[in-house]
Image (spheres, rainbow, N blue to C red):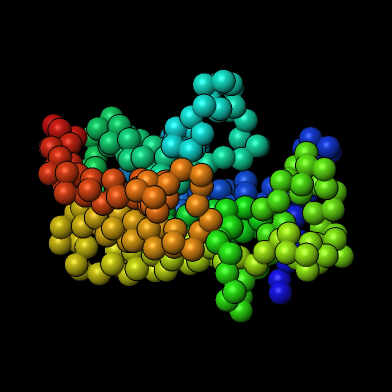
Amino acid sequence: MYIHRLHPELIRFTDTLAIRWYGVSYLAGFLLGYVLLKHLIRKGLLKISVEQLQDFLTWMCMLGVMLGGRVGYYLFYTPGELIQNPLQLFMVWQGGMASHGGILGCALVLIWWARKHKVSLWNLADNFVTVVPLGLGLGRMANFINGELWGRVSSVPWAMVFPLERPEFNPGGLLEAKRYDLVTLQNWVERGWLQPRHPSQLYQAFAEGFLLFALMWGLRMSPWSQKQEGRLCAVFILGYAAARFFVEFVREPDSRLFFGWMTTGQFLTLFMVLAVPVTMQLLPRFNRESDT
């Protein structure tokens, strides 16, 4: 049985300064996105300049992903913590990002940036969502390396043990130094204090990340998506929603359940699906305004 012992830090410089895999995943996601979007510009599919792309991704990184993800985490999962200490919003090294918050933040930046620069919102959005799944997949891989957001208890042959499920091994816990001690961890497994679980982070990395990216890229290169702008936005929302909703059934739920079984992630995903027909009706108006 695999016992998770990967370290979240790639390189440590001092007691307070280190390069973490989570940060590397975000950087890699934006770099890959930039390269792929430049390719779409050269092919004439993304109708902005390279200089505009650099400005767009800068705003998207600062406001859409980072601020949206942080605000979404505290708003959707731990609203009380932000009220008690608003400065936690800027303590990104402590972790805490919500993909739903990041998606909502990116949507708002898309609308604002397209109207400001008078470009087609549909065209910008279609190309952006084509590469977004790559970043999502890399982020989930970082979740796995961090040993966080594990799945539910399972007996499948590939089930894994995640020591951080026990608060004793958490940062600041009584046995934090023993988190990577294989003998100690095996002893806890034998006693039933640690249980094998679904590696749901890897499921999500594949489903809402790399598989969805392959689908989106294939459709972006096909005549189907080029006949009508906006189609890829709907495909992305529905594809992400389906992947997230079903994987949540094997992911360890948070303490808050809706209707006795629905996780917060599933509940928020339903609103994404419901937003598709509304968005399809409203967004053409933004395109008309951006053309004037």
Near-viewer residue (165 or 95): 165
Spot occupied by residue 70 in the image (x, y as percentages of width and height): 50, 35
Task: Point out residue 38 in the picture as x, y percentages from the top left corner.
Answer: 41, 54
Question: Is 256 or 57 nearer to us in this picture?
Answer: 256
Residue at position x 82%, y 43% from top? Answer: 174
Placement of 164 over or under 174, stated as above or below: below
Determine whether 201 is above or below 172 in the image.
below
Q: Quadrant of the N terminus?
A: bottom right
Which residue is found at the position 28% from the left and 36% from the top?
A: 111
Location of residue 249 by image quarter: bottom left
The quarter holding residue 101 reads top left
Residue 170: give x, y in percent of width and height: 73, 45
What residue is drawn where x is 39% and y is 37%?
Answer: 105
Q: Is residue 200 left or right of residue 165?
A: left
> Which of 282/221 is in front?
282
> In this rendering, does residue 47 appear at all?
no
Q: Position of residue 160 (x, y in %)?
A: 65, 68
Give the residue displayed 30% in from the left and 32% down from the top: 112
